[in-house]
Image (cartoon, rainbow, N blue to C red):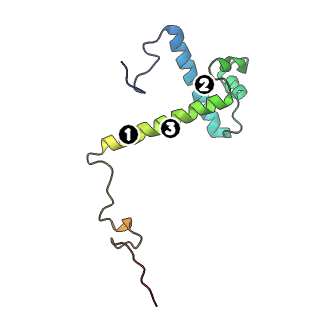
Amino acid sequence: MRGFGHADPAQDAHPRERARVEFTRDIKQVARRQLAEVGAAALSLRAVSRELGLASPSALYRYFPGRDALLTALIVDSYAAVSEAAESAAGNSPTGPPSTAGSASATPSGTGRCATRTSTR
């Protein structure tokens, strides 16, 4: 059994499924680029299909039911990438996350001690 998120689903798939996975990847790549260029509000399936060289955006509806579904898929991919990066960073540190104990910059006063307020009454 493959681990979640670690195996390439296109590797062992039937040729038709492999083509679907690869085309879905292409759609997301183009959509990601357009999202960076024009923003979420201006992202359109028509523009994505045009950049992919498709005659009509209707072909994309076989992969994503609409623009919002494509945006959701991109968001999910982004969160997965951030999660993988965080896990990798935590795994690469021999002692775990850096500690702020004893650091002068860890306290508001910069002295290493908590700053207390004294009454002037």
Mark 1: secondary structure: helix
What residue is shown at x 62% (from left), y 20% (from top)? 63
| Residue occupied by mark 2 | 27
State yes or no: discs 1 and 2 in contact (Cβ < 8 Å). Answer: no
Count neighbours of disc 1 (C-alpha within 10 A) and say few if under 14, some if 14 to 19, many if 20 or more. few
Mark 3: secondary structure: helix
Quick one: label 2 or label 3, which is nearer the N terminus?
2
Residue 107's x, y, as percent?
Answer: 38, 68
Mark 2: secondary structure: helix
Quick one: label 1 or label 2, which is nearer the N terminus?
2
Count neighbours of disc 2 (C-alpha within 10 A) and say few if under 14, some if 14 to 19, many if 20 or more. many
Residue 47's x, y, as percent?
Answer: 71, 28
Query: Where is the N terminus found, in terms of image quarters?
Result: top left
- Amino acid type at circle 3 is Tyr
- Amino acid type at circle 2 is Ile
Taking 102 as reference, is 42 above or below it? above
Q: Nearer the viewer, mark 2 or mark 3?
A: 3
Q: Residue furthest left?
A: 94
| Residue occupied by mark 3 | 79
What residue is shown at x 34% (from left), y 68% (from top)? 104
Image quarter for residue 86?
Answer: top left
- Give residue 87's mark: 1
Image quarter for residue 38?
Answer: top right
Tell me the distance, in whole angstroms, between the alpha carbons under discs 1 and 2.
27 Å
Taking 26 as reference, is 38 above or below it? below
